Image: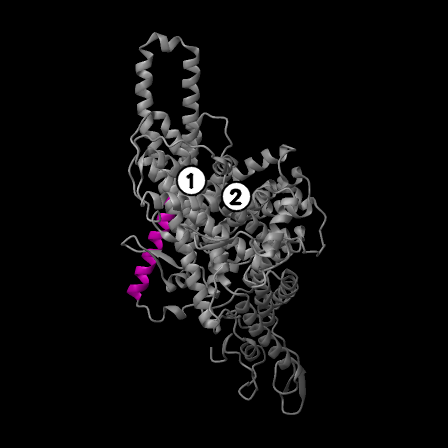
Amino acid sequence: MNHRWTPLLWIAFHYLLFLVDITPFTCGAANSNDESDVDDPSKRILVNGDVLVIGGAVFLQHPPQQLRTSIESSCRQGNDMACLYDETLQRIKTSAIEMAELSSAAHGEYNGDENLDKEFDLVSMLAQDLLFIGSFHREQLDDGLVSALAHDQDSFSDSSDTLTKEHYVRAMGAFHAALYYYRKMWSIMNEQPPTRTQDVYYLHPILLANFGVALQLSDLYERYYQVFHEAPRSDGADMQRAADAAAREAYSLSYRYLLTSEHWCVKSQSLLESITSYEEKEEEKQNKHTMYNNDPYEKLYRRQVQEQHQLYVYETNQSLAATNARIGTLLLTMYAEGYTLTSEEMLKHEPAARTILLNSFGYVIDEEQEDYTDEIIDTIKLDQERLLLRIIDRIKHGISIYEDSAVNANLDLEDNRINMADSYYHLGMAYQYIGDYKSAISEWKTSLDLYRSVFNEYTSSPSTNAELIMDVVQSLITTSQQCRDASLSLGHYDDAKAFFRLNLTLRRYLEDGVSIEEALDHDKVDDVEDDTQEDVEDSIDYQYDQVFWGSTQLIDDSIHQHQTLLDEYYKTLLNHPDGSYHEVTLDIDGSEFSSMEFSDRVYEGSLRSVIGSLYLAKNDVRAARDELELAVVLLKKGMEDELRGVWDTKARDIDGNELSIPLYVADALLNLSYAQCGLKQWHKSMSSFEDALDMFAKELPEGENPFDYKNKDRGHKSREPPLRDNLLERMKSKYSIRVENFELRVNSTIGSEDD
């Protein structure tokens, strides 16, 4: 759930595209220097005939045919930016040539006010035109993303999609160059002596432009850099290392430009604050003169200036709040990828950090930690916690600015509930990583309240865009899902049921188009007839533990391993009489033979439960449902056998601890409910979920929760179920027979006879 702009901020940003005539007046402003890229020659525009090199990207006067066709098609479809593309590019070329001539004539220095004014005009025009070009290519790039998703394309990495890559390269180049020239505008104006307070309002749009362009660059790096990074043609390991390096560079660059955005926000804030006291003093002076107090035009003018100033302050505060929240969100993503914050306040990518994170969720993948001492591991954990605390501080700071801005604005402006809801959601995620589930749920509940408030407002207005409503509903679904899992972690089963019921009603609203009243009434889901439809073409991916399981190949390998165990088990059942499971020929009294059939339902059920869960991790919900339904049946029969005393010995895990078969039933039911949800079997899904939680509540020891139970199962180096083969132990107890000469297939991944 990425941080979103309010419509007001988008209007403010696109307004920058059309700043045509800014006069170079300045006012005393705070001197700060984040001008590291101002003199970077790679950001300049080079002109060679019909070729422009902008920010390292090559722009031709006559673009490649594929791009030319795309631009012309967009123009015919009513895209005004596409229609103005050639004209704008030609103006950039002309302005760049004039800039070069002016610089050459002045020998790189200003030559009087006339040259300074001319240079500023050229720089201003270049900045605006480059922002226009970058915004056009960014728009086309995002449209390409939507198109790719609509056609089930995994990414843009396919070399055949040269058009999308062309848009990416040109957007990057144009934004880099635009940032260079906006910084140049600030540099020129900031060097001039202050003239009047009103000049600040000429400076403010330039600061806002620097902020906006840096934010665009940050977003481009975060979303697309790794996708378009050219990996070397080499073996798989080298390509993976290159991809990992590209991801780290993308995060680094995105973070850098977010800090740049924050820098320009703070600069703008300081600039506006510097004139507030000045305006108050001027007003105090004027109030002493009756002439000013009685002049209606003067009063009107002063009120308009105050309102404009208030609007600028509001915009700046909103931008600063959004930037802080986005910094926190990006750092949260980086944390999940293995970044830490050292005691020297340095962000560091530590390979073992991600492994430690996975282990904390019960996934034991400790190969990368073998060379680390306990002391090093403890240091990494401290650095992880330090980063999480920094993330929490950042997001909280953004939220506080949002709240203060809303209170102090007193303007009829677009509210910021969506961004605040997103911020509370990510704040809850940070608390979850720390393990503070109570705080996480508290923040997510606040997020849910804000989302629901916006949802109610959107759905009550017939003019609201349907995509906006769907976006909010998706956020409600994601947040309610997090609340459900956190409630399970705390053992709050009634709360978990309520959140899951909310999750189902929202999914029904989104996927089946039920009425708004029914979607918001949690109790009505049980009144709906069981929906057995299995058309999942438009259903939402469940994304079961996807981030922790890793690649699809890893899941496929694990499915294959468990399926092999199942196949071996069936072979053992079929090959008789050979001392195997299915038929055992015993000479009990020395004269008669008896034939008995045995099959370990718990063993087979546990295998199918794991296979079904793995299919769920792939979002293959139909295969998951089939395996898990059978697993539940087998495990319940095994539970009945246990209750009827068929076996005198209890099932035990690999450590010899007694197993509770009902807990295996509950685990299978829990995953089955998720698969049924993915198949739109809403009533069955709710029923399975409630049955699972009732069983967990009855069987789990006090103080434990379903995730504690699952993590115990994962506390071994294999991801297979920790069930061992107890068939022989049961046979020994039930029939008092000698089994030393029996042929037994033992699966080391599940347990051994010696255990």
Query: What secondary structure is marked by label 2?
Result: helix
719 above or below 299? below
- Mark 2: amino acid: Thr
- Mark 1: amino acid: Leu
Give the residue at mark 2. 88
Where residue 245 appears, x then y in whole percent? Answer: 41, 63
Asked whether 382 falls inside the magenta stretch, the response is: yes
Q: Nearer the viewer, residue 411 or 690?
A: 411
160 above or below 207? below
Which span is picked out in magenta?
374-395
Quarter of the view holding residue 576 = bottom right
Q: Residue furthest front?
A: 105
Q: Nearer the viewer, residue 672 or 660?
A: 672
Of mark 2 and mark 1, the one earlier in the sequence is 2
- State whether residue 725 appears in this view: yes
Q: Residue, x 47% and y 77% (percent of image)?
A: 755
